[in-house]
């Protein structure tokens, strides 16, 4: 069965799942011309693993609630709405506009609280002991503003969001016709009951952070003993509750040689996706500018991705470093972040506020306008916080 990625009277792009892989085709009168303009985007979807195809007669019990909500649909990734769906259509329309230079904040992370039981060495939002958090009403207002500005993926973050009273209310508040509700967590507090309540609230996917497939090394990076066991147990609970589960790995020199073990760990648990993002010198790690991946380590990762692509039975891979290399840094182009104080940042790693959600109903749009007016976010280069020129020019503004 083919699913429409994009369609208008003169041009269409379809995706067809078959035997665990996708095939993307284009058609229409202007296809020979317009296809060249979206070659990059089409390649992102073509010949890739997908998570599940939802059909009434074949729907896995795990995906029953997803089928009821979206009917026949292709779940391509934990990072985007099902294909087709109103939220996916909004996302594609936004990307078509971005191709014309009219960028919108597609993915907005909201750190609802700074409270966290961990002390991660690479945390982008260190606990300042201010006990800062957004109220439920403030967060709902932020959600409204973000969606009005074009967001199709609202990600609840922290700190540790599982400790936030009212989390399920916020998840339920995200209109699935406009955006998906997702969450980042360390897994601490992800009990069977909590996982079920998150699923019942309408959480689309949950990303659990794993820094190493080895318990001692993971706990060292997290600054607390026992976190690895909590994360593994939380993943199992989330899967049992019927949630889409993604393992999120911060790729760094300390774990780049353990990629096969990370993959085997994710596969053994049965998660739906395994995502990698390269470590960023920000937050608690802001002065570690030399501890980033070397060209040789990038090549190790690239070869790993190519090999995993041959495995038809493992989780789908989302390769952040390769995506950034292909499409450029997303900060201030497709990403936006809101802190527990309400400050609006280009992304969670760029500690420069351009506004505050508490200042009015149009705060997000005003902040986005300021961000887009700043030439730094139009360069489309590698991660800005790993860019020496950006750090030298903007370093005094880092909070």
Image (cartoon, rainbow, N blue to C red):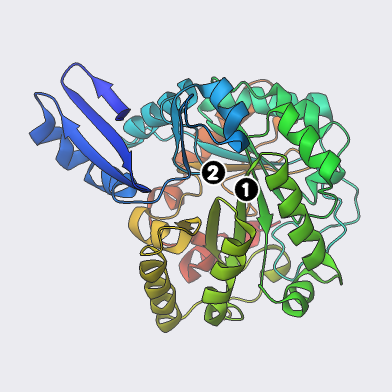
User: Is 285 or 205 nearer to us in this picture?
Assistant: 205
Q: What is the C-alpha distance between the residues marked 2 and 1? A: 7 Å
Q: Which mark is residue 262?
A: none
User: Is 73 or 353 nearer to us in this picture?
Assistant: 73
Residue 334 in the image: state x and y as whole percent: 47, 41
Please identify the quadrant where the C terminus is shown.
bottom right
Residue 72 in the image: state x and y as whole percent: 44, 24
* 324 to 64, vertically: above or below: below
- Left or right: residue 204 compared with residue 171: left
Please identify the quadrant where the N terminus is shown.
top left
Q: Quadrant of residue 18?
A: top left
Quick check: marks 2 and 1 in contact, CB under 8 Å?
yes
Q: Quadrant of residue 336?
A: top right
Residue drawn 68% across the image and 70% down it: 285
- Residue furthest front as drawn: 57
**SS of the residue under disc 2:** loop
Residue drawn 46% across the image and 20% down it: 86
Mark 2 neighbour density, 10 Å: few (under 14) some (14–19) many (20 or more) = many
- Left or right: residue 2 compared with residue 171: left
User: Circle 2 sits on which residue?
Assistant: 78
**SS of the residue under disc 1:** strand
Q: Quadrant of residue 199?
A: top right
Can residue 157 be seen by looking at this rendering?
no
* 135 to 312, vertically: above or below: above
Mark 1 neighbour density, 10 Å: few (under 14) some (14–19) many (20 or more) = many
User: Is 341 or 23 nearer to us in this picture?
Assistant: 23
Residue 98 in the image: state x and y as whole percent: 36, 35
Can residue 88 be seen by looking at this rendering?
yes
Label located before the other in sequence (2 or 1): 2
- Left or right: residue 353 compared with residue 131: left
User: Circle 1 sits on which residue?
Assistant: 245
* 319 to 361, vertically: above or below: below
């Amino acid at each position: 069965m083919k699913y429409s990625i994009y369609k208008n009277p003169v041009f269409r792009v379809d995706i067809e799942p078959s035997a665990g892989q996708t095939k993307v085709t284009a058609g229409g009168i202007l296809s020979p011309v317009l296809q060249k303009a979206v070659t990059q985007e089409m390649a992102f979807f073509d010949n890739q693993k997908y998570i599940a195809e939802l059909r009434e007669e074949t729907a896995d019990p795990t995906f029953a609630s997803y089928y009821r909500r979206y009917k026949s649909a292709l779940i391509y990734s934990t990072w985007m709405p099902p294909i087709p769906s109103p939220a996916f259509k909004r996302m594609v329309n936004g990307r078509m506009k971005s191709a014309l230079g009219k960028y919108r904040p597609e993915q907005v992370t909201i750190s609802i609280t700074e409270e966290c039981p961990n002390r991660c060495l690479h945390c982008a939002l260190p606990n300042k002991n201010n006990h800062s958090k957004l109220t439920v009403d403030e967060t709902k207002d932020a959600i409204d503003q973000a969606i009005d500005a074009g967001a199709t993926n609202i990600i609840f973050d922290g700190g540790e969001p599982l400790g936030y009273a009212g989390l399920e209310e916020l998840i339920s508040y995200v209109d699935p016709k406009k955006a998906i509700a997702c969450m980042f967590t360390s897994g601490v507090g992800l009990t069977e009951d909590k996982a079920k309540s998150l699923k019942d609230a309408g959480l689309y996917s949950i990303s659990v952070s794993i820094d190493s497939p080895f318990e001692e090394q993971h706990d060292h990076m997290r600054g607390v003993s026992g976190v690895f066991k909590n994360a593994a147990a939380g993943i199992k609970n989330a899967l049992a509750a019927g949630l889409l589960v993604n393992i999120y790995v911060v790729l760094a020199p300390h774990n780049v040689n353990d990629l096969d073990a990370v993959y085997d760990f994710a596969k053994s648990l049965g998660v739906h996706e395994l995502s990698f993002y390269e470590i960023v010198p920000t937050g608690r790690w802001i002065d570690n500018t030399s501890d980033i991946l070397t060209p040789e380590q990038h090549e190790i990762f690239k070869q790993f991705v190519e090999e995993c692509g041959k495995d038809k039975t493992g989780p789908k891979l989302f390769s952040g470093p390769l995506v950034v290399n292909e499409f450029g840094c997303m900060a201030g182009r497709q990403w936006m972040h809101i802190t527990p104080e309400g400050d609006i940042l280009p992304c969670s790693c760029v500690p420069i506020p351009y506004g505050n959600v508490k200042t009015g109903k149009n705060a997000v749009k005003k902040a986005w306008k300021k961000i887009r007016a700043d030439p730094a976010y139009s360069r489309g280069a590698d991660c800005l916080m790993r860019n020496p020129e950006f750090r030298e020019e903007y370093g005094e503004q880092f909070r």
